[in-house]
Amino acid sequence: ALARQYRFFHWHLEFPTVFDADGAGGFDCVLGNPPWEMPEVDDKAFFGLSHPEISAEQSAHNRKSLIDALASSDEHAREEWLAHIRRYEGERAFFTSSGAFPYSATGRLNYYKLFLESGWGNVSRAGRLGMVVPSGLTTNAYERPLWLSLVRPGHVVSALDFENSALLFPNVD
């Protein structure tokens, strides 16, 4: 039930001919454009459609009281909220404690870093990884552990930075 709910995916089980029994091997090429989102529990967004009065409340303390009151007025919504929190906390615990993301699951999580580290782990020794990621990966101090894990061993062949001055992507600066 949990595998269906969380849609677990194990690369080595899904592609047994790509990876050896000891985990060696990998893809010749992995390309990706991962989401650049930071997973967070946002009660305003969660209740925006179902309970706009909760979403509209400016005070976090008052929003919590309104959410707690759902236990008697809308138990289903309250249970969905608790499941939402549980999923977030469970995912965060997996990312930070599993050992699968030693360089990207630190500080404030961002999906692109997790995808990048996972993608690199699925590339063969002679393979190549290409990802569309924020240029901050190369310059931001809090991205340094992940960036250095790729640069120091000589894995980075090139990093290209594109300025969106023509607003090809209107929501990206």
Image (spheres, grey):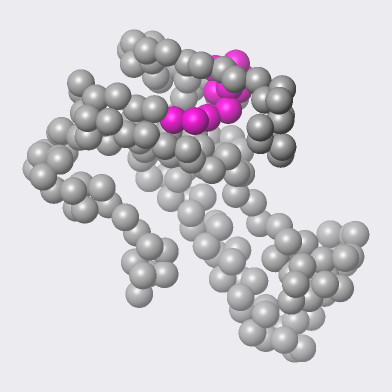
In screen coordinates, is 29 left or right of 167? left
Please say whether residue 43 is one of the residues in the magenta stretch. Answer: no
Percent across and percent down for residue 170 are: 72, 37
Pick whichever, 58 or 13, lies toward us: 13
In screen coordinates, is 160 left or right of 6? right
Percent across and percent down for residue 47 are: 74, 69
Percent across and percent down for residue 129 are: 34, 27
Pick whichever, 96 or 110, lies toward us: 110
Please say whether residue 139 is one of the residues in the magenta stretch. Answer: yes
At x 38% / y 15%, what residue is drawn? 156
At x 19% / y 53%, what residue is drawn? 13
Residue 88 vertical position relative to residue 25 in the rendered view, above or below: below
For residue 115, which quarter of the picture?
top left
Which residue extends farthest right? 58
In screen coordinates, is 21 left or right of 131? left
What segment carries the magenta color? 131-141
Residue 155 vertical position relative to residue 35 in the rendered view, above or below: above
Q: Quadrant of the C terminus?
A: top right
At x 31% / y 55%, what residue is drawn? 9
Mark count: 0
Percent across and percent down for residue 5 are: 41, 69
Q: Quadrant of the N terminus?
A: bottom left
For residue 7, which quarter of the picture?
bottom left
For residue 26, which quarter of the picture?
top left
Residue 147 visible in the displayed image = yes
At x 66% / y 56%, what residue is drawn? 41
